[in-house]
Amino acid sequence: MPPVIFSERQVRILNSKLPELRKKAMSLPLSPGVYIMKNKSGEIIYIGKAKALKNRVSQYFGSQNNHSVKVRKMVDNVEDFDYILTDSEFEALVLECSLIKQHSPKYNILLKDDKGYHYIKITGSEWKNILAVKQKLDDGAVYIGPYTGSFAVSNAVDEAKKIFRLPQCTTIFEKGFKRSRPCLNYFISQCAAPCAGKISKEAHNEAVKQAIDFITNGSKAAIDDLTAKMLEASENLEFEKAAKLRDRINAINKIGEKQKVVSASVKEQDVFAVVGASSEQSGAKACLSVLRFSEGRLFDSEHFIFDMPEDLPTARHELIRSYYSMRNNIPKRISVDGEVADSELISQWLTHLAGKKVTLYTPQKGEQHEIIEMCRSNAAQKLGLYLGKTGRSTAALDELANLLGMKVPPEYIEAYDISHTAGSDNVAGMVVFRNAAPLKKAYKRFMIKGFSGQDDYASMAEVLERRILRYFEEQGTGEGFGRLPDLILLDGGIGQVHAVKTVLDKYSLNVPLFGMVKDSHHRTRAIASDGGELSLTSKRAAFTLVSTIQEEVHRFSVEYHRKKHKASSLASSLTSIEGIGEARANALLRRFKTLKAISQASVEDIASVKGMSKASAAAVKQAFEKNTESQ
């Protein structure tokens, strides 16, 4: 990303406050404690903890070049700070959590707890129904609850409706109501179709009663009850009824088996994953997704949207602290999708809260890694919805950023490819992908001008240098060449990367740069970097995105090369005519477009082209006539 540039006024403001604040910070002891940043109004805007107060606090008021944008903004608003000494870093963490919960400072990562109460509603109509609702109304219905969180309630209702074949629509089934044909759910055995008269009101309401029993008492109790009823029906020779009860028992078992394999090895855990993305309207945002497991089953899911942090390990630390400041029932295991700053300290704090040993894990493979990826996918879907993007593109960019070690997913990607025929008609194509979609109005074509012959490395270096020089000319516009990409991808391997890296270093630009490596079948295989190659085979979303970019930039550059090659071939046919050089040949092609059109033109029309004479026009006409006679 381009460097942040402060105005002269901002620099003066910062410089006027920094010496005084730094002097105060340097007088702090090298002891653990909590520091409290305040603005001009005395309002607390940030609270942090430190192992050594002097070292940590003085860093804020030293060189601003080492700070993130968020920290710079915070420091710009600091008028003064207080501090509280503690006996240990752990005590500092406990105090920090308490103070943050009390004051909700602006610059701390805060999770908004919008988790209200939810109910299961049993309608009071003749044809009863069950619904997941947020409010308890005085409408004659029966309500079960309250439950915290909608996930468990919605899941329970959805499962019960499928098992007991209850309508999933909102149709009100009045007496005598019939439709000529039931919907698809009837044909896939997920609804008994009361709308089409396929089930009686009594049988429907009995199914609702069994569904409620399943939700409230659990699957084991529901299976025991249904099994007893099935045996009774069988003894009474009511085989059709027994078969329906058997099908419900099988459906419950099937749901249970599906849920058990979600987390077979770890029965109780919470899973955290953070995904970032950006949009022109909302800026850079991130989503924290939390999946909660009990008895190996997913029983709750939450997500939180916040401003994209620049330091993910520190952010994960703050997010875990913030989440468990709002939630109880801390499991023994918390799986996280990456590094957590001060992980041992946060684990100690969680152990203290839970009254049992709590450990943080970052799974790298196997079932647990798959659950982490599921959590990341969930976060990408939620963030994509928030930003008005597709969850697929958000997930792909997040996965790509994670693979390449980028702090923020690349919103604006430029890709380059070279195309030529044995060194002739050497050209390059540049394509742009914004939010994982082609931005065709930003595509650019380049003719290689610095040399002739075949040298892909030199060609790529020339193209990127010309692009960078255009950036310095147009950077005030912030569009097209006037903005730097978040990521540059080159069609090629380490050789192309090294050639372009030299150019970026020459102009002191720190733009992430990677190559797109193909296999022997000309398909995307890996990502090339200074340190070697990164495999894409296990990153499905990132693989699809990079493959799409590589195919598009190849198509675009080859298309341009073919056009240039055709034009040069036509021009060479004309330059073989006496008196026709390259300039006259190109002028004729610009006017007539094709050799056929030139051959059919009169001498007067040919002579009217700029740079042509009557004699040269006659030579052209004669050459084409001779060629026709020889055929």
Image (tube, grey):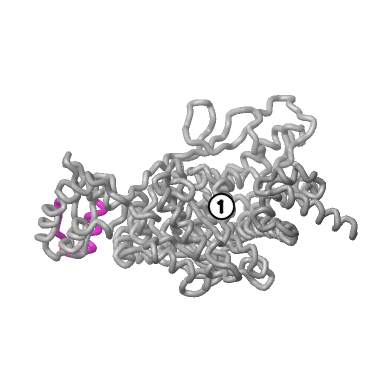
Q: Is residue 83 above or below residue 606?
A: below
Q: Is residue 377 above or below residue 104?
A: below
Percent position (x, y) of residue 526? 57, 69
Towards the viewer: 19 or 335: 19
**Direction from residue 618 to residue 515 in the image, left or right:** left
The magenta stretch is 82-98
Total labels: the figure holds: 1
At x 18%, y 64%, the residue is: 55
Percent position (x, y) of residue 624? 82, 54
Find numbered disc 1 in the image and state the secondary structure of the residue it sits on.
strand
Q: Quadrant of residue 507?
A: bottom left
**Direction from residue 621 to residue 556 in the image, left or right:** left
Towards the viewer: 486 or 400: 486
Towards the viewer: 117 or 390: 390
The magenta stretch spans residue 476:
no
At x 74%, y 59%, the residue is: 578
The residue furthest bottom is 532
Q: Is residue 603 above or below residue 540?
A: above
Mark yes or no: residue 2 visible.
yes
Percent position (x, y) of residue 561? 65, 59
Percent position (x, y) of residue 149? 46, 44
Give the quarter of the figure containing the N terminus: bottom left
Name the residue tied to disc 1: 444
At x 85%, y 53%, the residue is: 625
The residue furthest front is 615
The magenta stretch spans residue 93:
yes
Give the quarter of the figure containing the C terminus: bottom right
At x 75%, y 42%, the residue is: 605
Towards the viewer: 608 or 183: 608
Mark yes or no: residue 234 visible.
no
Amino acid type at circle 1 is Lys
